[in-house]
Amino acid sequence: MSQPDKRAILAEGLAAGDDDAALHVRLVCAGVSAASAKYEIDRVGKDPMATMLRRQAARMAKQGWLLANQQRLAFEAEGGFALDTLGNPDPDFFYRHYYEANRPAKLTGIIDHWPALARWSLDHFAAVAGNNAVEAQVGRERDPDYELDKDSHRRLVRFDELIDWLRKDEASNDIYLTAYNSGTNAAALTPLRDDMAPIALLDDSRERDGFFWLGPKGTLTPWHHDLTNNLLVQVLGRKRVRMAPPWAFARMRNSRHCFSDWGNDALPAGEGDAATPPVLETVIGPGEGVFLPVGWWHQVEALDLSASMSFTSFRRPNVHVEDYASWGEIA
């Protein structure tokens, strides 16, 4: 019979905020004798690393209290925990009550002036840019970590070949032209810029900003959070967007970078429980959008053949990566 790893048990207890009595119980329950448990706890009291771990556990407990209060305030708000819909919002109102408050919203009327709403179709894409080479994410379905491994899924294809594949109108998550491919595709898809116009909520000095998304019904971006504030607008087809707040971090199962271990799970909309996070859910169709604040977890699923644009060019500094340290394994 293998002996229990006393150091691992102590480390787990210290990280959980156990006092000496709780540590003793934890060790004894794991099969350590009472005398040996007392000896180990006496050693812990003289270990500076254990002291720092206890201090960190106390800080984490304080952060947990603060996040729990944010949840309580969100649930007690007028209308409860809900996603507001804003029709062609005044920019000052939007920035004061949503952007600066780190609060998501569904938006309507913000791209009603875009020719793209009438023009965009597979035929239009083929006519204006079909001969160009574009980069897409390919072979996603055989890789459970397709988002984390997106560099290995980059493939150059002729745009008209991709369009012909999309004409089959088959549900699939295997191929998707995403924002990650935009650097390569900027020149190839320049003709589509003529179908767009400035958005009043954004910085109008950057007219050519934005990221193009095109894929079939069934494309799914798994649960993650971004390192910027984002505006996602739908031009062709519909997308279902699920969102969970930053203060639900402990329930988001974040073990790698900005991705959640919930992955593609369809977490139900509602206030959640001890194991699952609170979730807001909406469907955006042509001409509609959603504001996704930095740090908000979200999952995006195409319900139809879908073409979208996303933007980060807000009227505020929107680069939050400099002090972001969790690039690798978190837990």
Image (tube, grey):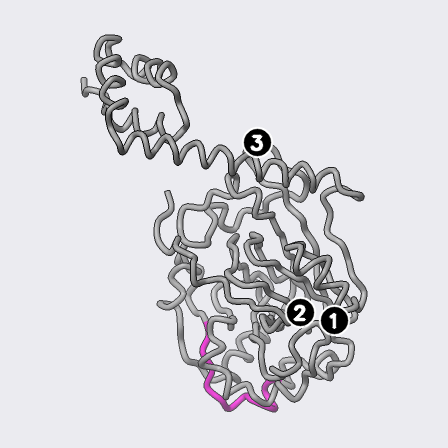
Q: Nearer the viewer, mark 3 or mark 1?
A: 3
> What is the number of the mark on residue 287?
1
Rendered position, 167 above or below 32: below
Rate crowding at label 2 as few (under 14), some (14 to 19) or many (20 or more) other CA atoms within 10 Å. many
Q: Residues under labels 3 and 1: Cα distance?
A: 37 Å
Task: Give whichever of 6, 275 is nearer the camera.
Answer: 6
**Which quarter of the figure is the N terminus placed in?**
top left
Q: Which amino acid does label 1 sit on?
A: Gly
Kindly state the secondary structure of the residue where label 3 is placed: loop
What's the CA distance linking mark 2 and mark 1?
7 Å
Q: How many angstroms separate mark 2 from mark 3 (CA)?
A: 33 Å
The amino acid on which the numbered mark 3 sits, given as a three-letter code, is: Ala
Mark 3 — residue? 274
Q: Residue 234, percent across and down?
A: 67, 69
For the residue labelled by badge 1, is the local secondary structure a helix, a strand or a loop?
loop
* Residue under the point 60% across and 73% down: 313
The amino acid at mark 2 is Val
Residue 195 falls left or right of residue 250: right
Q: Residues within 10 Å of mark 3 (few under 14, many from 20)?
A: few
Residue closest to the eye, 49 or 180: 49
Q: Which of marks 2 and 1 is nearer the N terminus?
A: 2
Q: Hey, which quadrant is residue 155 in on the image?
A: bottom left
Q: Residue 233 carries which label?
A: 2
Asked where in the image residue 275 lies, by quadrant, the reply is top right
Q: Position of residue 193 (x, y in %)?
A: 62, 86
Extent of the magenta region: 125-136
At a point 75% along the width and 69% down the height, the residue shown is 91
Q: Is residue 95 magenta?
A: no
* Residue projecting furthest to the top: 34
